[in-house]
Image (tube, helix red, strand yellow):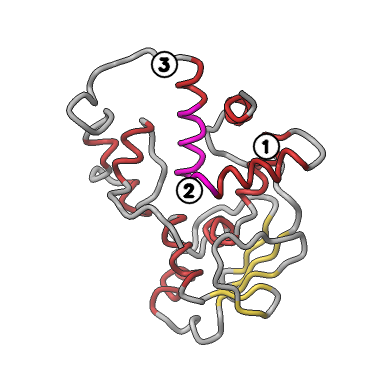
Amino acid sequence: MARYKDAVCRLCRREGLKLYLKGERCYTDKCAVTKRAYAPGQHGNNKRKLSNYGMQLREKQKAKRFYGVLETQFRKYFEMADKQPGITGDNLLRLLETRLDNVVYRLGFATSRPEARQLVVHGHFTVNGGKVDIPSYLVSVGDVIAVKDKSKASPKFKELVEAAKATTPQWVSADAEKLEGKIVSLPTREDIDLPIAENLIVELYSR
């Protein structure tokens, strides 16, 4: 299973904003974007005006990095979104939002999407009572995502119960005591709070 293995803080610096890939560290003064608010590399301080293609590319890269998806899989999501009725850009973000790792993060059971991905891969979650360890698993309305009974006693999830202050989006409901959540509805564009111009991604793939 392919995944990005280099320093994730470089990704935030490259996009010029916090992608919240390091959990609580991103909210402190140790955040790389706070300390060095310019792109990595020896020419990182050089300001260049982006072409239309450059802006489209940056939006695609930003979306990929927010959700932890590599190029081949991201293109597959776009192709799926393009075949669905409705607005392609909205469909694309909806598919990305309904990935299991993102849902675990949205429910407040992880402090970042990379951490949520790791917890899913390690088999800590069930969907409708069955173990699912595939981060890209797409959930549906009515699905119940829960921490496995054996995992509920771990210090990690006990801390989450005590510090569960995250506000969950309207399309999911979470029960911090039971460590489970439910998909109430599919997310709309208004439910997705990420600064992504999905229309530029559609333009890029439509070239």
The CA span between labels 2 and 3 is 23 Å
Label 2 sits on residue:
70
Residue at image x 38%, y 34%?
A: 17
Residue 24 point in image, percent of width and height: 35, 54
Which element carries disc 3, helix, strand or loop? loop
Kindly give the residue lying farthest to the right in the view shown. Answer: 85
The CA span between labels 3 and 1 is 28 Å
Is 32 in front, or is 85? 85
Identify the amino acid type marked 3: Leu
Is 62 in front, or is 207? 207
Label 1 sits on residue:
190
Does the stretch in magenta take in 115?
no
Does the stretch in magenta take in 59?
yes
Is 125 in front, or is 176? 125
Q: Main secondary structure of the magenta part?
A: helix
184 above or below 72?
A: below
Number of labels in the image equals 3
158 above or below 71?
A: below
Residue range (magenta): 57-72
Q: Earlier in the sequence, mark 2 or mark 1?
A: 2
200 above or below 96?
A: above
Residue 111 point in image, percent of width and height: 43, 58
186 vs 57, left or right, is right
Residue at image x 54%, y 38%?
A: 194
Residue at image x 34%, y 46%?
A: 27
Label 3 sits on residue:
50
Q: Are marks 2 and 3 in contact (CB under 8 Å)?
A: no
Identify the amino acid type marked 2: Leu
Q: Quadrant of residue 3?
A: bottom left
30 vs 49, left or right, is left
Q: Residues within 10 Å of mark 2 (few under 14, many from 20)?
A: some
